[in-house]
Amino acid sequence: MSELTNLTIAEARARLEKREITAAELTDAYLAAIEAANPTLNAYVAVTADKARAMAAASDARLAAGTAGALEGIPLGVKDLFATEGEHTQAGSHILDGFRPPYESTVTANLWADGAVMLGKLNMDEFAMGSSNETSHYGPVVNPWRAEGDDKALVPGGSSGGSAAAVAAWLCAGATATDTGGSIRQPAAFTGTVGIKPTYGRCSRWGTVAFASSLDQAGPIARDVRDAAILLRSMASVDDKDTTSADVPVADYEAAIGRSVKGMRIGIPKEYRMDGMPGEIEAVWQQGIAWLRAAGAEIVDISLPHTKYALPAYYIVAPAEASSNLARYDGVRYGLRVPGRDLLEMYENTRAAGFGAEVKRRVMIGTYVLSAGYYDAYYLRAQKVRTLIKKDFEDVFEAGVEAILTPATPSAAFGIGDQDMAADPVKMYLNDVFTVTVNMAGLPGIAVPAGLDGKGLPLGLQLIGRPFDEETLFATAHVLEEAAGHFAPRRWW
């Protein structure tokens, strides 16, 4: 790891502005780090070295001319779910083999417009369906963290595992990610990084490969809270090409860093104390409560009574939308094509070969719950439950609570190929138990590192906020971060 790749975005931005370093030097340092580490960590599925160097050169010219953007010269990784013009975009799936879109996603276009440099595309669970980054066509990502005294490879979480691992291992200054049921916050917690899922509609979904359209939301994964705030300000925008994007002004999120939380009402939901929750998760939660109380926040017990229905409702709504969205992959227009005797057989052969086991499982579940005779019993009922979950949060916020503190995950990172998880998909789905409610209600949520478990692995806390009040989350998360300190993996790769 060079000294340059150890810089946060804020630190690198300051040194670039003072011309103490160049964007070209910074980019070359990251490309060298990727070349050395990626064969071990498998965080990148495509490295765009030539493009990165050209973008860095352009950034240096703008820095010299005094026309620098907000992210001028900052090298970023891009989750493989975002369309990048002329570059590898496969959503971690075999069925999109060779796809290079002729257009740019709105989120990445916003970043490039602000001067950011693209290092490459980051590994992910196939079509964002997974909690461990083991469903990718390109193989699992390896978490840069290891348990003390143990060489076993651990998962980085999912689906944005490549993004989280690359940030934690200093292979990019920050990364784009997406969150449908926890896919930013869970991997951030597993890797000791910061990840925020903004309010639904805060970032455009245009040009982002769809999983579940009413739940998907883009956001950043970064090394600290300030960097996450810097990235989100550039990523967020209203967009005419996405009718679900919200025409709400984008705040200066970085300005919220350092804001006092004195007098703020923080809710602690009793329903998040799950049966069998590890003692270390409860302990880090209590520590977070103590830190916020010490900073002057008022801690109040709250109830979110429909929480227990969130996970089953999510695993009806999300697969239903996925089965609809993934119907477009048929081998006709782009990506993989496996020939057949006729058109129907070509469809069948292509989808059988192109989709992995987890994607097939969710498509089949989704097709089932949308089918005649089951739509009312499953999908319609799940949507009604979703409304009740949203109402729970509305009631709490209307009562004066400004943010909610919960654990981010039910455990620390587990091993790649964990047999219990492999044998029982529901155990894997339970990794999302603390995060799916936020997506179901369309709320913002941030995961921030809060400590290490007994094996030296990172544990995270989650803050849930009111719609479009990401500023309060950044301010509160910064208080937790300052109290907890910063965590980095011991370099072994």
Image (spheres, rainbow, N blue to C red):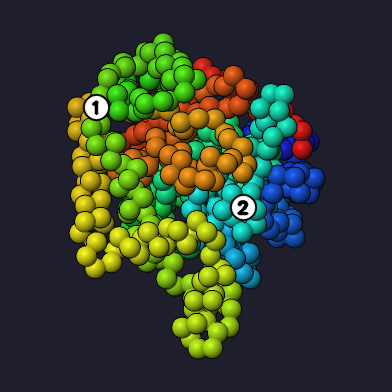
Q: Amino acid at mark 1?
A: Ser
Q: CA distance from mark 2 to mark 1?
A: 37 Å
Looking at the image, residue 143 sits to the left or right of residue 201; the answer is right
Residue 131 image offset from top left, x and y in percent: 51, 45
Looking at the image, residue 400 sits to the left or right of residue 76; the answer is left
Residue at left offset 58%, top offset 78%:
337
Q: Which mark is residue 36?
A: none
Near-viewer residue (255 or 167): 167
Query: Please, is residue 279 above or below residue 271 in the view?
Result: above
Q: Which residue is mark 2?
A: 123
Residue 19, located in which quarter of the rendered image?
top right
Can residue 7 be seen here? The reply is no
Residue at left offset 19%, top offset 33%:
395
Residue 437 image offset from top left, x and y in percent: 33, 40
Q: Which mark is residue 303?
A: 1
Quadrant of the frame with the N terminus: top right
Residue 308, located in which quarter of the rendered image?
top left
Residue at left offset 63%, top offset 65%:
87
Residue 336 image offset from top left, x and y in percent: 59, 74
Residue 403 image offset from top left, x and y in percent: 33, 28
Residue at left offset 72%, top offset 24%:
149
